[in-house]
Amino acid sequence: MADVEPEPLTASRDSLGIAVQHASINIPIAAPGDSVDELFASLRLRRFDSAAVVAVCENDRLLGLLTVERLLAARMGARVTEVMDGHPPVVAPGTDQERAAWEAVRHGEPGLAVVGPLGRFVGVIPPQRLLSVLLEEHDQDMARLGGFLDSSASARSASTEGVGRRLWHRLPWLLLGLAGALFAALIVGAFERQMERQVLIAFFVPGVVYLADAIGTQTEALIVRGLSVGVSISRVALREIVTGGMLGLLLAVLALPLVALIWNNVEVALAVSVALFAAASVSTFVAMALPWLFHRLDKDPAFGSGPLATVVQDLLSVSIYFVVATAVVT
């Protein structure tokens, strides 16, 4: 048998979920000149992580794989190169684990070779590891289809946890919302003179805030739902930004004549329209950015992104409206 030194495969945080994490060097390894008889003799009284396939290597380069079925069917005295598969399916060390597992399934192989640059043999993913990867990926896929992230176990835990844990997960975000409400009151108070001069400005604060928040909530629901089924934000970001801007523009175009006609004030109508467009555009961006941030931090967007997005959107909407109103209304 060829003498290939075991190489420790230390999986860092960045390497989790890739082929090299599951590869083992503790498998039968033969040299191209070995006979089937010599290979059989060398396998006795040795323990391997898996003996489903034999790697045929020369100078640390993989030449082929030999399955147990081929080995048992070979005539005595035959060379391993005569019965091996010289073109087995292989994957690179950085290949995603699910793709690697399906590569083995597609070719009907009991193991999958991991090969580095220049054909350097890294190891073989044994069948039990391939099966565990497929089961893990299946669990994640089913969890995503159910609208959950990470795993069905964590989703069940979040849904069935006790009152104390529910309060712990949700109350901090609502306290943040309370702080945001107080800060919004300070912002409104800062524009007291403008409202005294034209009290009609105050009438439209709830409307602008509500519509901007509603558009942001729609975007947030779409983003969180997409993340739950594996759709990245980069795939929908541009379309959602354009959609939010167009919704704001349509609402602004509708609000301008209605406010001007009903309240007989073109300046306030213009301020409401411009603020609606700007606030809707900003709220769409916020509603995408926060779920993405929670997802990147491996936190459940369902608990924090909604309350936090509402606070940020409301503060920005109030600020935008009063800044526009101050600039437009004389």
Image (cartoon, rainbow, N blue to C red):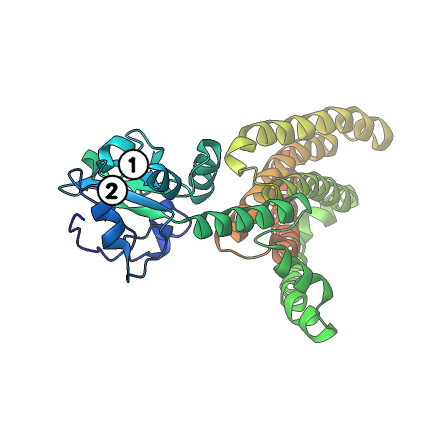
- The residue carrying mark 1 is 75
Task: Identify the mark at residue 8; answer none if there is no mark.
Answer: none
Where 47 sits versus 262, above or below?
below
Of the numbered discs 2 and 1, the one sitting upstream in the chain is 2
In the figure, residue 278 lies in which quadrant?
A: top right
**Residue farthest to the left?**
59
In the image, 245 versus 76, the foreground residue is 76
Residue 183 appears in the rendering = no
Q: Which amino acid does label 2 sit on?
A: Val
Quadrant into which the C terminus falls: top right
Figure quadrant of residue 328: top right
Name the residue at 29% across, 36% down: 75
Q: Using residue 190 as the reference point, say whether residue 257 is left or right of it.
A: right
Residue at 65% across, 58% down: 155
From the viewer's side, name the closer residue of 145 and 123.
123
Q: Residue 36: which numbered mark, if any?
A: 2
- Say which quarter of the image contains residue 172: bottom right
- Please tell me how crowded label 1 is: few (under 14), some (14-19), or many (20+) other residues with Cα within 10 Å: few
Specify the farthest residue to the bottom.
164
Provide residue 279's location: percent of width, then percent of height.
Answer: 63, 38
Query: Do the numbered discs 2 and 1 sit on residues whose CB atoms are within 8 Å?
Result: yes
Q: Where is residue 66 in the image (x, y as percent from the top left)?
A: 32, 39
Q: In this view, does 143 lie to the left or right of 196?
A: left
Q: What element carries label 1?
A: loop
Does residue 4 appear in this view?
yes
Q: Tag 2's secondary structure?
A: helix
Q: Which amino acid does label 1 sit on?
A: Arg
Q: Position of residue 152 (x, y in %)?
A: 64, 55
